[in-house]
Image (cartoon, grey):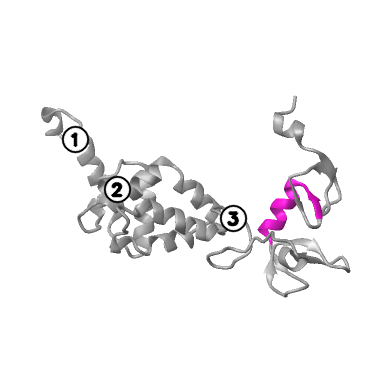
Amino acid sequence: DLCFRCAQTPHERCAICTHQRPVHTRWPVGAVCLPCYRRTIAHPQTCASCGDTKVLIALNATGVRICGPCSGAAIDYACRSCGHSGAQHFAGMCLRCSVAQAARLLITVDGTVRPELEQLPDVLADRGQPASTLRWLSKPAAEDVLHTLASDPEPLTHASLDQCPPTNTRHWVRAMLVEANFLPRRDEPIERFETWINELTAELPAHQASLI
């Protein structure tokens, strides 16, 4: 059985691949299936009309692919922040700018961002795949670590991170902050072992902790 959405989705000839598939969206070029939508969004090309790198969703009079604005359509996939064309997350913002926006929201406390973390949104935006970073930022563990760092009134140090739960998220954030020169380098295996011992003994009865 089909779900309600799939049952209601019409099947038409895709204007890009020409296969008979469920219609994901309608562009000036015609009905477009989901695979072609994703591929077109992910790979902007040079518009034959304006010469800019754009998501090409229309055809000119000679059948050459052009962007939405050049076809007279209001549909455009250019980021309102940086101007880059491609996939978007926040309204009107590309994935990279969406990462920076999401990170800034997480580290903003009482309307301000502590100076030590001011460049963190850009560091995250330029690190790895933006889509993966966006998914990571949406996880509670990532939100907790970043909020803890942003809320700590003390200067940013390795001890600031040690306040966070001992998870892989804490280790990943520490490595990122060291790589970006937010934190100094240290002998990570030794320091992590010492932190683990301290956290372990803190949960033990005094007579057991004294043996470790």
Q: Which mark is residue 88?
A: 3
Which callout, 3 or 2, points at the residue further toward the start of the chain? 3
Which callout, 1 or 3, points at the residue further toward the start of the chain? 3
Q: Position of residue 162 (x, y in %)?
A: 26, 47
Query: Where does the magenta region start and end?
Result: 30-43
SS class, disc 3: loop
SS class, disc 1: helix
Identity of the residue furthest to the top in this view: 1
Question: In the image shown, does 67 or 174 lie closer to the viewer?
Answer: 67
The question of residue 111 being in magenta is answered with: no
Question: Residue at 15% across / 29% down in the picture?
Answer: 208
Q: Position of residue 82 (x, y in %)?
A: 54, 67
| Residue type, label 3 | Gln
Figure disc tally: 3
Q: Is residue 203 left or right of residue 145?
A: left
| Residue type, label 2 | Thr
